[in-house]
Image (tube, rainbow, N blue to C red):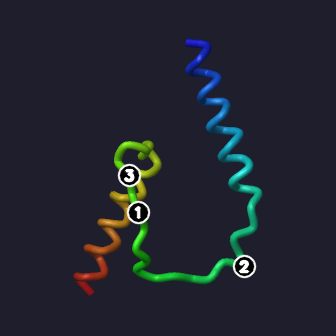
């Protein structure tokens, strides 16, 4: 159980560091081909896939 808490703490630390990065200078892309590995996907990746699919569906309906 302690190992799980340590893993959660590591993930939170990584997320905190990620949030400190300024992405404002990155170019805006559209329909970019991005590699995806189910092996390395976490819950956030699966949620993002669901949101993207829903957005694609809404765009097709307009």
Residues tagged 3 and 1 counted as in contact (Cβ below 8 A): yes
- Residue beneath label 3, please? 37
Q: In which quarter of the image is residue 25?
A: bottom right
Q: How far apart are marks 3 and 1 (CA)?
A: 7 Å
Q: Which residue is drawn at 26% across and 73% down?
A: 57
Q: Which residue is drawn at 36% across and 58% down?
A: 49
In the figure, is residue 28 to the left or right of 30?
A: right
Residue lying farthest to the bottom in this orientation: 62
Q: How far apart are marks 3 and 2 (CA)?
A: 27 Å
Q: Which residue is drawn at 75% across and 67% down?
A: 22
14 relative to 31, above or below: above
Neighbor class of circle 2 (other Cα within 10 Å; few <14, some 14-19, many 20+) is few
As helix, strand or loop, the secondary structure at mark 3 comes to loop
Neighbor class of circle 1 (other Cα within 10 Å; few <14, some 14-19, many 20+) is few
Q: Distance between the residues labelled 2 and 1?
A: 22 Å
Residue 25 circle label: 2
- Residue beneath label 1, please? 35
Q: Which of marks 3 and 2 is in front?
A: 3
Q: Which of 62 and 43 is in front in this view?
A: 43
Mark 3 or mark 2, earlier in chain = 2
């Amino acid at each position: 159980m302690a190992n799980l808490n340590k893993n959660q703490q590591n993930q939170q630390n990584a997320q905190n560091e990620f949030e400190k990065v300024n992405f404002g200078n990155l170019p805006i892309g559209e329909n970019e081909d991005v590699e995806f590995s189910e092996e390395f996907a976490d819950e956030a990746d699966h949620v993002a896939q669901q949101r993207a699919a829903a957005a694609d569906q809404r765009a097709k309906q307009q």
